Image (tube, coloured by chain):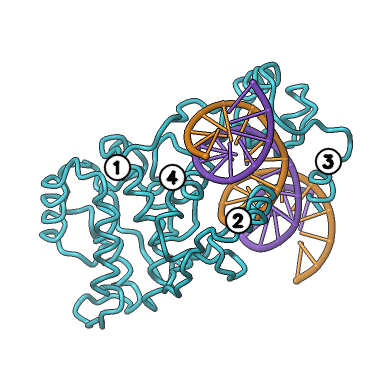
Chain colours: A cyan, B purple, C orange
Amino acid sequence: MEGVLESAGGGGLRKGAWTEDEDRLLRRCIEAYGEGRWHQVPIRAGLNRCRKSCRLRWLNYLKPNIKRGEFSDDEVDLITRLHKLLGNRWSLIAGRLPGRTANDVKNYWNTHQKKKTTTPFPCKTGCINNGRQPSAVAKKNNNNNNNIPRLQITKTNIIKPRPRTFSPKTFCWPKKPTEPKKPNSNNYELSPLSRDDHHHRYDDQENHAGAGNMWVDQLESFLDDGIGSRPVTESGGLETDQIPLAQLMSSILPDHSEKSAIDLTAFQEDNYQSLWGDVDIWHLLSDHHDI
DNA sequence: AAGCGTTACAACCGCAAAAGG
DNA sequence: ACCTTTTGCGGTTGTAACGCT
């Protein structure tokens, strides 16, 4: 539908590289009307572009705070580890990298990291081709050089989370501490963890303040430990399917949580629900641990 | 200097999910 | 409940810039 209307290049819409004038028009439009309602953007901005093109240009290039330039070692490490856990969930990975877009991360991975890995990630359709078919250039290159080393294809146990809706019957949110740094005893009534557990976790987090990849560390250790598949006792008085979930969320995401695994200070003011709204991690684990 | 190969990244495409009527 | 529209994502391609021979 959309592909027919917008992707065929019909209607005389402009394609290709954006000019400075187009950038200026788009920026002015977004500043005036805000993000969203992309179908109206080309009209409002007076651009002869499809809404997809406008959105992409804004999100990947014009949007303020977009970080350009080389990826730092920390960022590379985080990308590598998150990719190992999440696969080609670029938007999810980019969400943990302030200022980086999914396209940036994807491009980086495709041009740098994939060369280093021997376990290519299967694409959506299940094919294992490192997520990329030979481009025209590559095809041309291959015609002239049949000795290009091929990646060794090995089968890996890839976790492929998928979007899903939360059910209140199977999950209850732990409550957000009113004071982010110092847990209050009344704030955890829905959490299966004891207050001491929470204090311990806070202490632990403070001890690791500045450890940018703590979030990933915890996620990885969870997967290694198999916490999510532990048998549940009745001592907690909770639904059997609530305990491992709340347990894992507490163990993976700290109570003051992180919007970014790198910038640990930025999210303390943030809304708890929005931080935990990124439920793909839970989906990832629930898929893998039969929670 | 020219030609060719490689790299990096902007941009496009198709699809599926979400939102709205 | 169903259909249409909108949005967002991941895969892929095009091409400018660079490096090497």
Tell me if mark 4 has few (under 14), some (14-19) or many (20+) residues whose alpha carbon lies within 10 angstroms of its own.
some
Q: Which residue is mark 2?
A: A145
Badges 2 and 3, same chain: yes
Q: Looking at the picture, which amino acid does disc 3 mark? A: Gly
Kindly identify which residue carries mark 3: A9
- Marks 1 and 4, how far apart in space? 15 Å
Q: Report whether mark 4 lies on the same chain as mark 3.
A: yes
| Label 2 secondary element | loop
In this view, the mark in front (2 or 1): 2
Task: Please say if the residues under marks 1 and 3 sit with CB atoms less than 8 Å apart.
Answer: no
Camera-side residue of A189 and A265: A265
Tell me the residue that label 4 is attached to.
Answer: A95
Q: Position of residue A266 (x, y in %)?
A: 31, 35
Chain ID for label 2? A
Chain at numbered mark 4: A
Q: Nearer the viewer, residue A148 or C14?
A: A148
**Image-based side of A203 in relation to C8, left or right:** left
Q: Is residue A59 above or below residue A240?
A: above
Q: Give coordinates of residue A122: x percent, y percent.
A: 53, 66
Secondary structure category for the residue under label 3: loop
Which chain does the numbered disc 3 sit on? A
Q: Amino acid at mark 4?
A: Gly
**Quarter of the image that includes the C terminus of chain A:** bottom left
Mark 4 or mark 2, earlier in chain: 4
- Among numbered discs 2 and 1, the one appearing first in the sequence: 1
Q: Position of residue A28 (x, y in %)?
A: 64, 18
Q: Residue at x 74, y 32 (%)?
A: A40
Residue that label 1 marks: A74
